[in-house]
Image: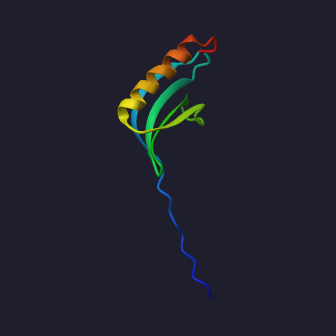
Amino acid sequence: MESSTLTLVPRDQPILTYWRLPHPDGHTLVCTSYRTHAGLELRAGLEGDCPVLQAVVATHAEAHRLAEVWKKKIARSPAA
């Protein structure tokens, strides 16, 4: 009889939330960095939903710069 083992994959760990913006429909837009199996990742989107913006970044400084770019882009958007 074959032995099977269950491999647990660690969940992505949130590190830092760069901003939270209220959305007209009552939801909140959030931009957070995460520690993933691939490294550091920046994600933005409606809180609790899949991210609409996502990028692998090399450093926290790069994540901070990109978060500011995304925030300005979203603030200029007519849907924001």
Q: Where 47 falls versus 2 (above or below)? A: above
Q: Could you tell me which residue is drawn at 59 percent across and 35 percent down?
A: 49
| Image quadrant in which you'd find residue 25 | top right
Left or right: 22 as drawn, with respect to 35: right
From this view, report whether residue 1 is shown above or below residue 68.
below
Let me know if residue 19 appears in the view.
Answer: no
**Residue 68: % across, % down:** 44, 21
Query: What's the residue at 54%, 70% (across, down)?
Result: 6
The percent coordinates of residue 60 (x first, y second) are 36, 34
- Residue depicted at 45% across the width and 25% down the height: 67
Give residue 4's position: percent from left, percent from top.
58, 77
Is the C terminus in the top left, top right, bottom left or bottom right quadrant? Answer: top right
Residue at the (63%, 15%) spot, across then down: 79
Q: Quadrant of the N terminus?
A: bottom right
Question: Residue 13: image x %, image y %?
Answer: 43, 45
Relative vertical location of residue 80 with respect to residue 17 in this rendering, above or below: above
Residue 53 or residue 30, whichever sits in front: 53
Picture mark count? 0
Using the rendered view, name the quadrant where residue 2 is placed. Answer: bottom right
